[in-house]
Image (cartoon, rainbow, N blue to C red):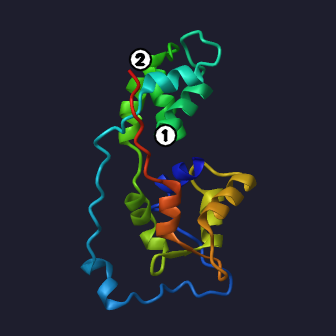
Amino acid sequence: MRALELLKGAQDKPVPPKSGISREPSPIPPERHPSERKEPEVPEVEQLPDIDPDCVFVYYDRDGDGRLSKDEFLNALRAMGACPNTADFEDVCQKLGSNLDHKALHEAWKKLFRQRPTSDKLIAQFRGLSQEGMIDKNVLRFLATNYGERLNEDEVNELLKLAKPDSDGQIDLEHLANALMPALPQAHKHK
C-alpha cells in the first residue's frame, strides 16, 4: 500500500530525461494539446462500503484488551480499504490520542476512507508523465525511489511485479491503477 502513497504525491514531480535523449519536449498531437484538453472529473468516495468495523477491530485486537497498537490500527484501517499516507495517519492518531479503541477505528476509517484515491485519480496524476496511457518502468522506479515516501528496493520490485511491464518495459497506467486500487468487495454485517 505504500505504493499508493507514492502515487498520490507524484503528480507534479519532474522526471529527468534519460541520458542521450533530448531535453526538448516531444510534440503533443493537436487533439491532446493541454489547452484543449479537459481533465476528467474524478468522483470523490462518498459512501463507505458495507464493512463492520467492530469485526475488523476484534480481528486485529490480538491481545483482547480493547485497544490497538498503532501498527494494528494502521493494518485494520488498510484492511477496511483506507490507504492513508504517513502524515494523514499520524495526524489522525494524534487527534485520537492513545486510546485506539473500536470507536477510534470507526472514526478514523470514516475520515481516511473518503480520502482514498480512485483508480481514475491515479491515472490523472500520471497523465503528464505518460504517452498514450503508458509509462516506462524505469520512470516509475525513479519516482518510487526518489519522491514522496520513498520505497525500498523490495517494495519497488513488488510494485513493478504488480504493474506487469510489457516486453518494452512499458506499463499500462490503467492496469496499474486498477491493480493498486481494486474495487472493494461488499461485506455483509453480522448482527
Q: Which quadrant would residue 32 be assigned to in this image?
A: bottom left
Q: Position of residue 43 (x, y in %)?
A: 28, 54
Q: Residue tagged by mark 2?
A: 103
> Disc 2 residue type?
Lys
| Residue drawn where x is 74% and y is 53% of the image | 154
Is residue 134 positioned above or below 126 on the image? Answer: below
Residue furthest top as drawn: 65
| Residue drawn where x is 30% and y is 49% of the image | 44
> Disc 1 residue type?
Pro
Q: Quadrant of the C terminus?
A: top left
| Residue drawn where x is 65% and y is 71% of the image | 138
Q: Nearer the viewer, residue 97 or 77?
A: 77
Relative to 180, is 119 on the left or the right?
left
Q: Nearer the viewer, residue 130 or 168?
A: 168
Q: Position of residue 23 (x, y in %)?
A: 55, 83
Q: Which mark is residue 33?
A: none
Q: Residue tagged by mark 1?
A: 84
Q: Are marks 2 and 1 in contact (CB under 8 Å)?
A: no
Q: Which quadrant would residue 112 be assigned to in this image?
A: top left
Q: Position of residue 75 (x, y in %)?
A: 57, 33
Residue furthest right as drawn: 153
Q: Compute the Cα span from label 2 to label 1.
A: 18 Å
Relative to 142, is 4 on the left or the right?
left
Task: Tell me the crowding category of disc 1: few under 14, some 14 to 19, or many 20 or more residues within 10 angstroms, Cα based.
Answer: many
Is residue 93 positioned above or below 170 on the image? Answer: above
Q: Secondary structure at mark 2?
A: helix
Q: Secondary structure at mark 1?
A: loop
| Residue drawn where x is 41% and y is 28% of the image | 52
Q: Position of residue 1 (x, y in %)?
A: 57, 47
Q: Nearer the viewer, residue 159 or 185?
A: 185
Task: Tell me the crowding category of disc 2: few under 14, some 14 to 19, or many 20 or more residues within 10 angstroms, Cα based.
Answer: some
